[in-house]
Amino acid sequence: MIIKGLKFIDLFAGIGGFHQALNSFGAECVFASEWDDHAAKTYAINYGLKPKGDITKIDENDIPQHDILCAGFPCQAFSISGKQKGFEDARGTLFFDIARIVHHHQPKLLLLENVRNFQRHDGGNTLRVVVQTLDDLGYSVDYKVLNASQYGLPQNRERIYFVCFRKDVVMDTFSFPSPQKHKIQLKDFLEKKPEVKPVVRSDIDMYKDYQPQEDADGNIVLPNKPIQIGRVNKGGQGERIYDIRGHAITLSAYGGGVGSRTGLYQVDKVIRKLSPRECARIQGFPDSFKIVSKITQAYKQFGNSVAINVLKAILCQIEK
Ligand SMILES: C[S@@+](CC[C@H](N)C(=O)[O-])C[C@H]1O[C@@H](n2cnc3c(N)ncnc32)[C@H](O)[C@@H]1O
């Protein structure tokens, strides 16, 4: 399937990770929905398209015809409570809104993303209802947990990705892209003069015996994952310090600790969080992407976003 020229819709659009990836393949966005005003503003400024609000209030007849439906839908818990009626069991959930739009428009391809634990939610029943519902709607369903760390981004971010073709469009099962072999470091994604303050505290504890692993030639072995080298306070969430020759931890929309949402890193002898621009980079956003919200909202937006490079690798595979 060639993506260029296809029309897509962006549900639960956030700041448009799906939009970035699909645009880079030449697809055109014809509709977006995002109810958070700050994210919607960032979206509108960057893509010239103002997202509509609450998807549960939008009639499917008011959504334009499209070829691809994208949705990084929130992991909203829903329990099937033994009824096992698929589509009906999802009623009242945000997945139901995806399903009713798919039912009406029958796009050729669905691209969905959720947290890694989605597959284990409610003992696997949630995933079963999703797969059954999409199958009933006429789609083949392939899903896999992929880590952004293995697709060119220095961030440990495991997410479940769904690629669902309308059965009459593509008959084969889909093979997800293989992990990329080359190693990368967070160091190469950092700003020279970031607008984040150093963390200055008396309870910073750097691990004295930490030595990066070296190969036979004395070169540092890049581990392609976060390497903790110290802590602040008790080393709880947002209190761990990492080496920038490794990867960042998962960016998150919420979370506490002095390093909330990004974790802490030792950069040029200073301990600091990542800046919003650095967060943008490790989610795959180009530097031309405009960050228009205040810092707390910007962290939330990048913490919620999808890892663009993983989507690009999936789109490449779809084109193959
Ligand atoms: C996990 S984030 C998806 C982010 C997006 N994929 C991106 O790349 O930025 C889920 C988004 O869904 C939005 N959302 C949640 N419920 C919604 C609803 N009923 N209608 C519209 N947007 C909603 C949230 O505000 C949040 O931005």
Image (spheres, rainbow, N blue to C red):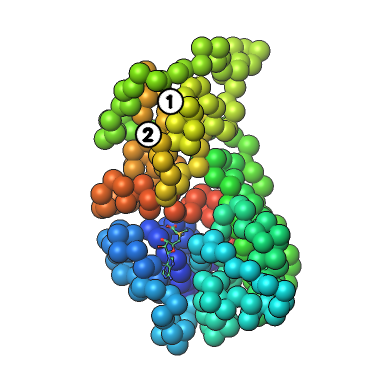
Pick out the residue farthest to the bottom: 61
Residue 306 position in % (x across, y down): 48, 54
Q: Is 50 drawn above or below residue 311 in the view shown? A: below
Q: Secondary structure at mark 1?
A: strand
Dividing the picture into quarters, in which one does residue 181 lie? top right
Q: Mark 2 sits on what residue? A: 258
Q: Nearer the viewer, residue 73 or 310?
A: 73
Position of 132 with respect to 265 (left or right) is right
Q: Residue at x 54, y 73 (%)?
A: 93
Question: How many numbered markers are drawn?
Answer: 2
Which residue type carries mark 2?
Val
Residue 120 position in % (x across, y down): 67, 56
Q: In which quadrant of this rendering is ligand 1 seen?
A: bottom left
Which residue type carries mark 1?
Val
Q: Please tell me the numbered disc located at residue 215.
A: none
Q: Please tell me the numbered disc located at residue 232.
A: 1
